[in-house]
Each structure stands twice: as structure tokens, then as C-alpha cells.
Image (spheres, coloured by chain):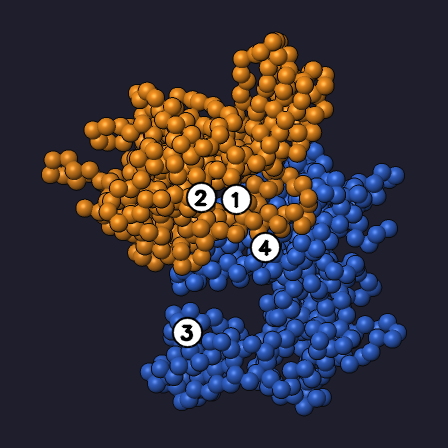
Chain colours: A orange, B blue
Amino acid sequence: MDLLDVSFDVGNRKIMALLVQKYGGTSVGTAERIEAVADRVYKHKQQGDDIVVVVSAMSGETNRLIELAKSINASPSAREMDVLLSTGEQVTIALLSMALMKRGLDARSYTGSQIRITTDNAHGKARIQKIDTEAMQADLDAGRVVVAAGFQGADEFGNITTLGRGGSDTTGVALAAALKADECQIYTDVDGVYTTDPRVVDSARRLDKITFEEMLEMASLGSKVLQIRAVEFAGKYQVPLRVLSSFVEGEGTLITTEGSKGMEQPAVSGIAFNRDEAKLTLKGVPDIPGIASRILGPISDANIEVDMIVQNVSVDGTTDFTFTVHRNEYDQALATLNSIAKELGAVAVLSDAKIAKVSIVGVGMRSHAGVASSMFRALAAESINIQLISTSEIKVSVIIDEKYMELAVRALHSAFKLSDTAPGVREA
Amino acid sequence: MDLLDVSFDVGNRKIMALLVQKYGGTSVGTAERIEAVADRVYKHKQQGDDIVVVVSAMSGETNRLIELAKSINASPSAREMDVLLSTGEQVTIALLSMALMKRGLDARSYTGSQIRITTDNAHGKARIQKIDTEAMQADLDAGRVVVAAGFQGADEFGNITTLGRGGSDTTGVALAAALKADECQIYTDVDGVYTTDPRVVDSARRLDKITFEEMLEMASLGSKVLQIRAVEFAGKYQVPLRVLSSFVEGEGTLITTEGSKGMEQPAVSGIAFNRDEAKLTLKGVPDIPGIASRILGPISDANIEVDMIVQNVSVDGTTDFTFTVHRNEYDQALATLNSIAKELGAVAVLSDAKIAKVSIVGVGMRSHAGVASSMFRALAAESINIQLISTSEIKVSVIIDEKYMELAVRALHSAFKLSDTAPGVREA
């Protein structure tokens, strides 16, 4: 049986599956690649599955349109940007439908407006409110392949909206939820979710399964395979989500509510990392109620997003307050902090942009004691100093000197036995 | 007063006009040209006019999309072609709206679906059935410029349709009719309708006014300034139509129900010509009922369109049957004719692709006797032999040897005194 065939055997009768397959911009970047997508859809259709395909704009097209807009108006209206950008997917749905028809399949394209993906009116970052499945369901019942434009919808007045960049994943999951699909398959240029970045650890292993919570932690920490919103959405509506490669056959990674199978649930599923952050500390501020908001208020007013926040117990009535921001916003955050340090009575402002965040992620941590201390021990064995620690139920993150990042990731990957143990695979 | 300002003076109060302005692909072909269109709209808006702008796809874009489709499917579905091609104008409406907003105008773009231009479902050549003006009117009342996508609509089920190439003119006229606009202005790369092609006759003169009927005859005979359907539509709904240049200031040509002003209506308004045709004759067929349909039936079955049809009185029970077709379809028409000649009892099949059609057009002909004979006299004076003659109420067409075409056009232009008589203009 094809590993990708998710149809079910019930007694002697094979029940076919309803699959929503989403293909990103790289997967539909040229006429040839669109043909390859059509071949894949054809194969699934021949296996008896019902298919809804969600596509992005051809790679490069969105940037071309943005350039065109910027050449005319440096700050174009959000409404008109959506009118402009939504043409990108509209081109792809038409072309893919043509490619499917060439293969003898009946296919029909839908823009976001035509499906009636109703969103709020937040142009450029709209949220889906309602999906009308009637027309699509009728097409599926008639044996047609439905080809839907990702990333777009329309508000209640028919104004075209977009869900923001990468929003095609969200469209895929939302359609899968609305149609009660058996699986939402996200085809991308990687063949699944890995225990860590294979460019850092040679023996990084593709995970067969991962939970929604783990995926959220992995994604937000830098394993940029899927859009966070799509994963949240899939988790909320319990849509089984699979990440696969458009270019290489394989079963990818299934993101689901259940954890990995097997006798023993591993404590840690993956190692995430990120060197895009910078660390700022207000040293020796008075430990009084409201001090946190007096520090972070001006940062938030400057539209700077804060990631980790750490405040330790106070000594002699003063405390050190540390947080991290994206490195792009480091200069602005530092200037803001310097301007408020005196009035807050801080002793000093410390800052460091040469840091990295390394995290271990796994739902197994919940039932395994000592995971954090194993992590710290592994780092200590490599003489890596930990500058900050932050924990949640399913992850432990540390901030370390940037130059030790790869070393830390490899050490942790090995310590938690994440490597592929198949013979011939080299351990880093 | 600006010659283009069609606002009216009623007593002391100036009543502003509602103008529908249509800009073709060349006029919006680059970001710079879109800015120029925005400048022009801004000027009219400052004069107090209400403006609805209808735009085509940027020049080259439609061909690019067609190439893309053909590279995937040699005979793409008409429905999906419409989904694909309609993105062309959608890009333009967004960009023009952005350009207008940069100038401080309030503007709002509309796709064909959003306006609710309801059409039949003849994809690629749909006909407009209904236009919903409510939203556009509300925008106009609020002082907004409405920017509408030409060429497109949607059927009653929301499927995107297109009106066929050049259909943006039709959109412009249809919107003008629905909104009861004071004028529909078609901006193009020529500055009006001429008495004949200025490339053939140096002294060809721009007409200030021309009737819808004359324009139809001029357009179908080769003065390809406006889409025939748009002119028909404008005539039917009595929408004053003006052809102007996007690039040169001027008052263009007004196409209207009234003829030219002045003491005397000239007999002939213009000279049209066409060298795209070929002539075929079945010689000596029996002059019996049904013979015409037995000849043209197979031609029509082969999807060949016939232009002129001439059959003279019979001599000895046989007649000669002649018709013209587009030169591209000459070979096929000739083959068809050869295959049926014998069974029809024809003596011979004669054919000639080296012909030209020259026509004089004018509503004035109705009230002027002897216009046809003046035409024949002028051609005879140049020793040009007339091969075929066909007449309608407002035109006389002749078929002549291709090599005399320019000579014939110049002779007729001069004979009917169409040249600009302003000093310094050279008579050909």
C-alpha cells in the first residue's frame, strides 16, 4: 500500500479519504511544477480519494506585485493591496485546473470570494469567520477536483481580503475543518518536521508524528515549516495535518493530537534554535509592584515584540529585569530602555545581541522528571554557560552565547538520543 | 473652458457631469502611464466631475497569461481561461486606485464580480445581462472615484466571465448606460476617428462628430478604433461616446445620434478600406431556389465567416455567385468550394486573394442622390476597375485590385472633399 494512501479498510470495503492538499509557491513556481502537482493529484484521485487542492501564488509573483504597487504608492491602501495580491493565487488555480483537465480529470477553480471564505475586514491579515462548503461539496460529490485559492477571502460586503503571508496553510486547514476532511496535507520544500535542523546536526531525524503543541513550540522557535496560525487552527479543529515534500516521495510528518507510538514516549521530540534575538537587562531596578509594566509599556508602545521575559527574586529590594527582542528591533529597544532607565532608578542597562536561544521540546516532558537537569548537564559537559532559562510545560529554553549554538544543539540532540539509529547514518 | 469639460451651464449654476473614462492596455501599460491616467482623472475630478474609470489589463499581460496557459494545456477550458485572464484588469484597478489615493483622492476598485456585472455563461465572449449600480452610485455620492475592471463579469452562479478581447470598451459603455453618465470617454492611442487612415492619406481629417451608424460601418471596415459591440451598445442606449488620446490633449471624436453640425450635412463622412479579404466565385451555377444556401452551407459548416455576397441576375438559367472571406480562411474556403463545385453543376471556381475593399460611409448619403455614381466616376478617372459592388443605406463598398487600394482611397478622399482645408495642410 502506498504510504500516502490514507484510505481506510473497513471489513472488505475500502473507504476512500477526503484529502485537502496544499501546495506552496515553490511547488507551483513554474508551468512544469504545476504539471508535477497535477500528476500527484491525479495519482491520488486514481486511488479513489476525493481531493481539494489549495494553492499559493507562483513563487516570485507576490514580490513582483508588491514591487509594482510600491513603485506607484509607497504606502498603498491595504484594501487595494489585497485586490492586487489576490490575483497571484487566482492565476495558479486557473493553471492547475487546466493541467488537471489535460489529464482527463474534471476540475473547478475557486477564488476565496467564490468559495465564500468570509473573513473580517482586517485587510492583509484577515481572520476567517465562516466557510460555505455547499458548492465545493457538490463538486466533490460529482467527482470533481476542487482547486481553491489559498491566502484569500472576502468580507461580508464582498471586499477581497488576504490572510497575510503564508496564509495559504491556514486556508488549507480551514477548508479541511469545514469539509471534515480526513487529512490536510501541506506540501512544501522539506520532507517533514525534523528533530532539529539537519544543516546543524547531520543525523537529525524526520519525525513520523508530532503533537500540535510540540509543533507550535517548534514552529515559533524557528523550525519554519508551517505557519503557526495553521497549526493552532488544526489543533483547535482536530484536523490531522501532514507535512510532506512536493519533490520527494515520502510519508512526511503527521501532526496530530496523539503523541508518537511505541512502548515508551520519548521525553524530548526535538531541538529548536534561533539566533535572531537580542537580550536586554535593566539592572538593579526597585522590586516594586508595577515595575514590569513600566519597563515593557514603552517597549510595546514602540511596537517592539518581546519574546522571553525573566525576572529573578530580588536582593536588597532591587531586581534585574531581562527580556529578549528580535535582533532587528534591538537598537530601538535599547534606545527606549536607555531613555527610561534613569526614571525607573535602574543601576545599569545591559545588552547583548550576540546570543542564541536553544530549546528542547516534547510532550513527553510532562511525565518525565529531570528533563531540564539533563539538558543543563549536557550543556555543562560542553562548558556552555547558560545566561537565561525559561520553561513551559512542554519546552525548556535557554539563552547562550551565540558562538556555542551549533555545539549546544548537537550536544542536546545526542543527549536526548534523537539521532536516527539506522546503520550507515553518521552521528554528528 | 477646457474642451474636455462636458459640464453644463444651467442659468448661473454649473452642473457637473458624470463621466465614464475607459483606458486601454497601452494607456496603463507601465507604472508611469498609470500615474499619467491618475493625473488626468485628478484634473477632471478637480473640475467637479464625478468619475468612473474603466481599465484594461496592462499591455502585454493578457498575452503573457495566454502563453502561460498554452504551455500547460493547448486547449484550456474557457471557464478557467476567464479566471486566469480576469486577473489582468484586477491588477490594474488596484494599481490605479493606489495612484489616485496618492493624489489625495478617495478611490475604490471593483472587479466585474464585485460590481455585479451579470453576464450569460458564454465564457470568453459573455454578454452583459444586468448591472447593479447601487454600490458604485453610493461611492460616487460620497465623492469617491470608482475604478472598475473592464472586460469581465460573472454569471448568475458567480463564475467569472470575460466579454472577449477589447471588451473593456463594452464595459465602459455599459457602465455609462447603467449609471446614466453624461459621456463615455474611450482613451486610446489615437486622438479620434479620421476621415480615413492618415497613413494612407496625409490630409485625413479628425472628425469632431460621427453617428453611431457611421462608426459601425467605419469600425467593421477596418478603422479599428472601437470595438463594434461597444458602439452598438452605445447606440442602443444613446450613450454619447467620445474617442480621445491618452497621450495628446484634444477633444477627440464624439460619436452620437446627431450628425455633424453645420449648414450642410456632407454626403460622405469617411473612407474605410481593408485588404484582409479574398474573393471566391462559383461561375455558371444553375439559378434555382436554394442554390445560395447549398453554396454557403458548407462554408459556414467549416466555420468560415463570409463578408460580402453578390449574385447578379441570371443569364440562360445560370448565374455567378461571388463572396468574400478573410484572407486567413481563403485556402480552406477555396478547398471547400472546389469539393462542392461539381455536384452543384458549376462551370468553374474563380478566386482571387489580391483584392481590397474600399467603402464610402456617411449618413448624408440618405439624402444625397448620386453619391454612388460620384464614387464610381472618381475611380474611373483613375482607371481603377471595379470587381464587385455592394451597398447599404449609409455605405457603398467596392472590391478592386489590391494594388490600386491607396490610389482609390486618396481619389475618393479628395472627390468627397474630406481633406482638412486649413491652410498649411498638405493635400495628398
Q: Residue at x 51, y 81 (%)?
A: B279
Type of amino acid at the residue the image marks with label 4: Ala
Q: Position of residue A220 (x, y in %)?
A: 46, 32
Type of amino acid at the residue the image marks with label 3: Ile
Q: Quadrant of residue A326?
A: top right
Q: Secondary structure at mark 4?
A: loop
Type of amino acid at the residue the image marks with label 1: Ser
Distance from the alpha carbon under mark 1 to that under mark 4: 15 Å
Give the labeled residue for mark 2: A149
Q: Quadrant of residue B341?
A: bottom left
Closest to the camera, between mark 1 and mark 4, is: 1
Q: Which mark is residue B57?
A: 4
Distance from the alpha carbon under mark 1 to that under mark 3: 45 Å
Q: Position of residue A223 (x, y in %)?
A: 43, 38
Q: Chain of mark 1?
A: A
Say if A403 sits above or below A342 in the image: below
Q: Residue at x 62, y 70 (%)?
A: B222
Give the labeled residue for mark 3: B299
Mark 1 and mark 2 lie on one chain; the one further toward the N terminus is: 1
Say if B244 sits above or below A337 in the image: below
Mark 4 and mark 3 lie on one chain; the one further toward the N terminus is: 4
* In-image side of B216 versus A136 (left or right): right
Q: Secondary structure at mark 3?
A: helix
Q: Residue at x 62, y 12 (%)?
A: A318
Q: Secondary structure at mark 2?
A: strand
Between residues A270 and A297, which one lies in front from this camera angle?
A270
Give the labeled residue for mark 1: A86
> What crowding class fits label 4: few (fewer than 14 Cα within 10 Å), some (14-19), or many (20 or more)?
many
